[in-house]
Image: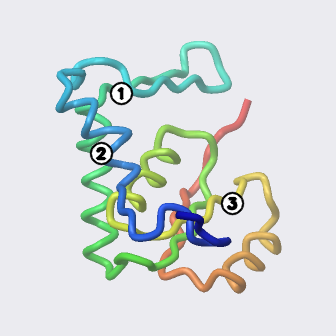
Amino acid sequence: MVLGVGQWFKGGKTNICYNAVDRNIEAGNGDKIAMYWEGNEPGQDGKLTYSELREKVCQLANYLKSVGVGKGDAVVIYLPMLLELPIAMLACARIGAVHSVVFAGFSADSLAQRIVDCKPKLVLTCNAVKRG
């Protein structure tokens, strides 16, 4: 069967968050490190196991649902390179929301233009971050 443009895996369904996180836990890897984070200063670092990652992803996914974000809704993620960035991406994937990551170094005008173009239901960001 030959599929045309835009028809790859037609009818197929997957959840990237499930494949990246839950399947590892189900395979007995819940206590293994899923993610390492290294900050700008020596000693600034973090790590999450698959089980810890799933807990944080589910917590954010539940928040997103509680404020009305659902399958197919757009979410703009405007965060620096913190552990919360991939958590936010996975939380969106978990509930079927479409996410657009905007590099945190972009200006307010650049962010505003992406918000106008995307018309997201929500923008995820943080108050401040210290960069080395």
Query: Which numbered tag is attached to residue 48?
Result: 1
- Whichever of labels 3 and 1 marks the residue nearer the N terminus, that label is 1
Residue type (three-letter) at the residue carrying disc 1: Leu
Q: Residue at x 37, y 76 (%)?
A: 71
Instruction: Return the residue nearer the eye: 53 or 127.
Output: 53
* Quadrant including the C terminus: top right
Secondary structure under tag 3 reads loop
Secondary structure under tag 1 reads strand
Q: Is residue 6 above or below residue 102?
A: below
Q: Are marks 1 and 2 in contact (CB under 8 Å)?
A: yes
Residue type (three-letter) at the residue carrying disc 2: Lys
* Residue identifier under label 3: 102
Query: Which numbered tag is attached to residue 56?
Result: 2
Q: CA distance from mark 2 to mark 3?
A: 21 Å
Residue 102: x and y in percent read 69, 60
Would residue 30 appear left or right of 6 to someone viewing this image?
left
- Whichever of labels 1 and 2 marks the residue nearer the N terminus, that label is 1
Q: CA distance from mark 1 to mark 2?
A: 10 Å
Q: CA distance from mark 3 to mark 1?
A: 24 Å
Classify 10 Å Cα crowding around label 3: few (below 14), some (14-19), many (20 and above): some
Secondary structure under tag 2 reads helix
